[in-house]
Amino acid sequence: MVKIVVIGSSSMDLVVTSDQRPGAGETVLGRSFKTVPGGKGANQAVAAARLGAEVYMIGCVGDDHYGAAILENFKQNAVDATNVEPVTHTESGTAHIILAEGDNSIVVVKGANDHVTPHYVKKSELLIKQANMVLIQQEIPEETVEYVSELCQELDVPLLLNPAPARPLSKKVIDSVSYITPNEHEAAVLFDNLSTESALKQYSNKVFITEGKAGARYFDGEKEITVPSYTVEAIDTTGAGDTFNAALAVALAEGKSINESLQFANRAASLSVTKFGAQGGMPNRTEVEASL
């Protein structure tokens, strides 16, 4: 069992399904409403645990009923949440999701996730040092991502950065992480002075650009390679990227090749969109391996 440490956000997802996406100033009728645990960090922690890793979460929730539900959800999914702290007088993070026309639109309110500071993460340095892989995203403060990239480099612990939501990163951070997984939009933000092809060549075997149904692209040092995805009937695409990143982190931590790891991640992500909810559709290890 590989040990994965996830540093990131936890939230409650407030999910509306509708046949039509509202435009500015427009009101439309929805078909259903649900609340389900989410947040990119929490999603990736749950996905990694279902895929057979020993998972530890570092993050913050609010001292409210959403926070209590998020902590209970970690327990139910075998994620160690010892290092997830309820923050007094702060609301838990929330994500407001509209599912319509075969895709999703999301507004994130960070809440307690802004309390995942470098000082807070430093308290878990020993845990991070023992990890086979650290997984981080960008729904927490920018300075924390910078701090973790430096810390993991110093401790010689592999770090996979999922640069979502998109925001510019210093070259120092990009150079220091082990792996980075932007989608096409995030890649344009990160490498605004480089073409996609140039960015992949400059960071061979390190930058993996995800392209949804088309799969994932990277440069292996000699040529550009596309690892194709799998064709499925999508019901809810929320959490597919989180499943991909968790699966990739688990596979790489287990010593699989980059190609094998991307195939594993693509398959896990494709299975995740066939059910409702960011975490509801996340497959277990048996399901992924059987379908491969």
Image (tube, helix red, strand yellow):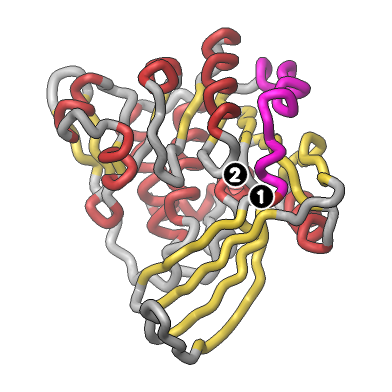
Q: Which mark is residue 217?
A: none
Give whichever of 164, 131 is nearer the camera: 164
Residue 158 in percent (x, y) is at 51, 20
Residue under the image location 46 percent in, 23 percent down = 255
Magenta stretch: includes residue 148: no
Residue 139 vertical position relative to residue 117 in the rendered view, above or below: below
Q: Residues within 10 Å of mark 2 (few under 14, many from 20)?
A: many
Magenta stretch: includes residue 121: yes
Q: Which residues are magenta?
A: 112-130
Amino acid at the residue labelled 2: Gly
Residue 155 image-quadrant placement: top right
Amino acid at the residue labelled 1: Ser
**Residues at marks 2 and 1 touching, judged by CB atoms closer than 8 Å:** yes
Residue 97 in percent (x, y) is at 52, 68
Give whichever of 74, 21 is nearer the camera: 21
Tell me if I can see residue 6 in this picture.
yes
Give whichever of 164, 235 is nearer the camera: 164
Query: Does residue 227 appear left or right of residue 117 in this picture?
Result: left
Residue under the image location 34 percent in, 71 percent down = 233
Residue 40 vertical position relative to residue 38 in the rendered view, above or below: above
At numbered mark 2, what does the secondary structure look like: helix, strand or loop?
A: helix
Q: Which mark is residue 41?
A: 2
Residue 239 in percent (x, y) is at 49, 57
- Which residue is under mark 1? 10
Marks 2/1: CA distance? 6 Å
Tell me if I can see residue 51 in this picture.
no
At numbered mark 1, what does the secondary structure look like: helix, strand or loop?
A: loop
